[in-house]
Image: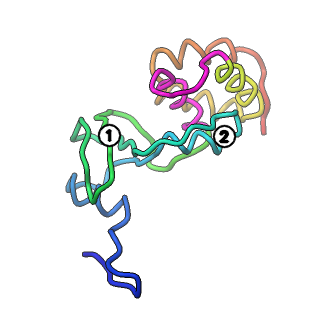
Amino acid sequence: MPRTTDFGVTPPDDKTLVKSFLKDDRFLILSPNMYNMLGIGTTQLYNDRVVYNHKRHGSFELGRLKFRFHRKQNFPSVLTKEFLLVDLVSNLKTLAEDETTLLQQVKRKAAEMNTVKLRKVVDRYGSTKAKKFFAPLLQKPLSNG
């Protein structure tokens, strides 16, 4: 239900829209813009949101916002920096960034992360491409931080 403020009617937040659309609360919303938070040199801004869920697949407009729904068996209930890094590698082809430069920065960032946490995320949620990319990095002792 939209709220009314001094500035007019406010749209519902993303989570409310998606929950109503899916009639389910098992989903994870993220935006490729969130990769910018990793500090690996991504700079592009994107106008859509990605929704990992168990029910729907496709692009939909909800409340004048674009959502790309991806049906996945496994995704975390809470977004972490480890998941974002693995997801970035899994979805590299969809980004408007230089792949070679970005992958070098991902290697640098992976070396700063907790190896145990990163390995678990790669094993559980990584695409085949991400698993192949991270395999040699996770063989070596990385950081515990």
Q: Which residue is mark 2?
A: 38
User: Compared with residue 6, is residue 132 higher up or lower down, i.e. above or below?
Assistant: above
Q: Tell whether label 1 touches label 2 (CB within 8 Å).
A: no
Quarter holding the N terminus is: bottom left
Q: Position of residue 111 (x, y in %)?
A: 76, 27
How many numbered marks appear? 2
Quarter holding the C terminus is: top right
Give left or right: position of 3 versus 109: left
User: Compared with residue 45, is residue 101 higher up or lower down, i.e. above or below?
Assistant: above
Q: Position of residue 124 (x, y in %)?
A: 47, 29
Amino acid type at image mark 1: Arg
- Measured in 3D between alpha carbons, the distance from the residue under mark 2 to the one under mark 1, in whole angstroms, is 22 Å
Residue at image position (47%, 42%) is: 46
Q: Which residue is mark 1?
A: 68
Q: Position of residue 126 (x, y in %)?
A: 49, 25
Amino acid type at image mark 2: Leu
Give left or right: position of 131 versus 135: left
Mark 2 or mark 1: which comes first in sequence? 2
Please name whichever residue, 70 or 43, is drawn nearer the observer in this view of the structure: 43
For the record, the magenta segment spans 82-100
Give left or right: position of 144 versus 81: right
Give the SS element for disc 2.
Answer: helix
Asked if the magenta segment contains residue 103, the reply would be no
Give the SS element for disc 1.
Answer: strand
